[in-house]
């Protein structure tokens, strides 16, 4: 595995692969790898010939009061894990390589970014995501890019960017990786102390309760949400949001007859955690 720092190096390596007729897969990450990241790398390894993993803690998607300075970083560990998954290139640029002096362009996706994490974290968050992902697509020119379904809203935003800007890349959303007790894996789980870790699992349990009610035939969105809210309340967790939204448009829904995203965000101890379930509709 090669660790590359510059756009020029990555473009040269990708161009060489393309001359040989090889397909290119990209796994965009902010590092602090866990099983969820590794599963994306395995999917890329299975589906494409040259696997590029970007490791870049993107400053533009953090607000001033968020955890940019303390976000977990361990490049040596991440590099060892990526090499273990037979990644070809780890692209680990400095911030100034991605955002040189005078950088003044931002991509905003209207509508999809106004709700859930967009409403909770602010418009800057998905503007930062959309901009850096578009830059990575321009640098790597992947055939396929792999994202985790845990960031379901992010996946929808990226797909809209690809559609609206006619970018020639296929977006693959891979299943959420979970701990044995159901907690969605996240780099921010390292912030959880023992007590918070015990409470954090109630996010997935809340979603499971809502899923079970939906699977039993309930389609009323308020009733399904109430089932999840009751579990969170029992654990003393006040969600930033707990909402059912159309799985494609993120519009509010009154029922779950069509595919519906049940999404939650909450602060548990020192960590802000997100999770979701896709409730399959009747069609």
Image (cartoon, rainbow, N blue to C red):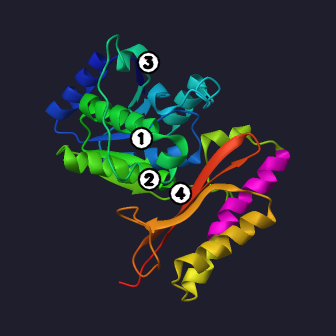
Residue lying at 72% horizontally and 38% vertically, measured from the top left: 191
Residue lying at 36% horizontally and 32% vertically, measured from the top left: 132
Callout 1–callout 2 Cβ contact below 8 Å: yes
Q: First in sequence: mark 2 or mark 4?
A: 2
Q: First in sequence: mark 1 or mark 3?
A: 3
| Predominant SS along the magenta part | helix
Disc on res. 95: 3
Q: Which residue is mark 1?
A: 126
Q: Quadrant of the N terminus?
A: top left
Q: First in sequence: mark 4 or mark 1?
A: 1
Q: First in sequence: mark 1 or mark 2?
A: 1
Q: First in sequence: mark 2 or mark 3?
A: 3
Tell which of 20 and 154 is nearer to you: 154
Q: How many marks?
A: 4
Q: Classify residue 182 as left or right of residue 278.
A: right
Height in image: 223 above or below 185?
A: below
Give the residue furthest to the bottom: 217
Between marks 4 and 1, how big is the CA–CA gap?
20 Å
Question: Which SS class for mark 4?
Answer: loop
Quarter of image, res 227:
bottom right
Callout 2–callout 3 Cβ contact below 8 Å: no
Could you classify mark 4 by the number of other residues whose Cα lies within 10 Å: few (under 14), some (14-19), or many (20 or more)?
many
Q: Which residue is mark 4?
A: 176
Q: Which residue is mark 2?
A: 153
Question: Which SS class for mark 2?
Answer: helix
Task: Assess whether residue 203 is covered by the magenta stretch.
Answer: yes
Give the residue furthest to the right: 195
Height in image: 43 above or below 11?
A: below
Of tags 2 and 4, the one toward the viewer is 2
Residue 157 can be seen in this image: yes
Between marks 3 and 4, how big is the CA–CA gap?
28 Å
């Amino acid at each position: 595995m090669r660790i590359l720092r510059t756009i020029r190096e990555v473009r040269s390596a990708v161009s060489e692969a393309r001359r040989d007729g090889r397909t290119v897969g990209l796994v965009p990450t902010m590092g602090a790898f866990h099983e969820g990241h590794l599963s994306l790398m395995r999917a890329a390894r299975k589906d494409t010939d040259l696997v590029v993993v970007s490791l870049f803690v993107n400053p533009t998607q953090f607000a001033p009061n968020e955890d940019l300075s303390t976000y977990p970083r361990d490049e040596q560990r991440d590099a060892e894990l990526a090499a273990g998954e037979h990644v070809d290139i780890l692209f680990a640029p400095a911030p100034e390589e991605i955002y040189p002096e005078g950088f003044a362009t931002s991509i905003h996706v209207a509508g999809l970014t106004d709700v859930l994490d967009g409403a909770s974290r602010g418009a800057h968050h998905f503007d930062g995501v959309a901009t850096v992902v578009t830059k990575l697509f321009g640098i790597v020119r992947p055939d396929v890019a792999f994202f985790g379904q845990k960031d379901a809203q992010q996946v929808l935003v990226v797909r809209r960017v690809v559609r609206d800007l006619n970018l020639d890349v296929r977006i693959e959303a891979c299943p959420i990786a979970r701990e044995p007790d159901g907690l969605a894996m996240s780099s921010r789980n390292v912030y959880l102390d023992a007590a918070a870790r015990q409470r954090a699992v109630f996010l997935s349990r809340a979603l499971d309760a809502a899923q079970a009610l939906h699977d039993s035939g309930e389609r009323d969105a308020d009733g399904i949400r109430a089932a999840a809210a009751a579990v969170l309340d029992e654990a003393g967790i006040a969600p930033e949001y707990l909402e059912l939204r159309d799985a494609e448009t993120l519009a509010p829904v009154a029922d779950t007859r069509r595919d519906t995203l049940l999404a939650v965000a909450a602060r548990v101890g020192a960590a802000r955690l997100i999770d979701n379930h896709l409730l399959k509709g009747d069609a």
